[in-house]
Image (cartoon, grey):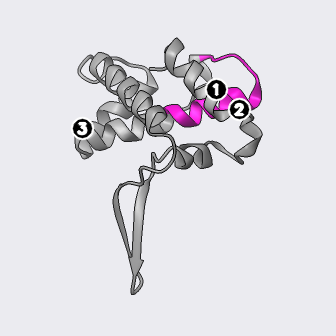
């Protein structure tokens, strides 16, 4: 997940969370969204855009891998674990890792923008 090292790096790099309108914009600024190539009315989604801070993206992806290794294969009943298990049934493990890193970035933005402490029960799956 997000430990002290990742949290410190994210906070230092973000500065003011008000710069971003929402968590989606923040995740996109870190390059955790697919690249798009559209032509002739056809939309093609490619790999992640890799825009923004490479170090922060790396920290979030490694944190997501840790979360996946601890929850993906265990029978957990919480909403986030079920979401992750269903995602792994539909998508490749690396795609699921980036999706989880994207979700973690959105959660970090939400916590910093609201100023409220993290509560696992309030984080949507």
Crowding near pointer 1: few (<14 within 10 Å), some, many (20+)? Answer: few
Q: Left or right: 50 with respect to 87?
A: right
Q: Which residues are magenta?
A: 104-119
Q: Left or right: 117 with respect to 35?
A: right
Q: Residue furthest top?
A: 4
Residue drawn where x is 33% and y is 20% of the image: 66
Q: Left or right: 48 with respect to 91?
A: right
Q: Secondary structure at mark 2?
A: loop
Q: Quadrant of residue 49?
A: bottom left
Crowding near pointer 2: few (<14 within 10 Å), some, many (20+)? Answer: few
Q: Quadrant of residue 110?
A: top right
Does the rendering let one see residue 125? no
- Spatial CA span between label 2 and label 1: 6 Å
Residue drawn where x is 35% and y is 32% of the image: 84
Q: Nearer the viewer, mark 3 or mark 1?
A: 1
Asked if marks 2 and 1 touch (Cβ < 8 Å), the reply is: yes
Name the residue tied to disc 1.
12
């Amino acid at each position: 997940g997000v430990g002290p090292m990742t949290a410190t790096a994210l906070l230092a790099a973000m500065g003011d969370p008000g710069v971003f309108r929402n968590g989606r914009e923040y995740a996109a600024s870190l390059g955790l969204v697919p690249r798009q190539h559209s032509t002739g009315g056809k939309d093609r989604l490619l790999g992640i855009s890799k825009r923004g801070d490479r170090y922060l993206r790396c920290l979030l992806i490694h944190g997501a891998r840790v979360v996946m290794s601890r929850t993906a294969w265990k029978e957990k009943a919480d909403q986030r674990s079920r979401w992750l298990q269903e995602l792994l049934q539909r998508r490749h493990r690396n795609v699921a890792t980036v999706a989880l890193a994207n979700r973690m970035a959105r959660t970090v933005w939400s916590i910093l923008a609201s100023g409220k402490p993290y509560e696992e029960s309030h984080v949507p799956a």
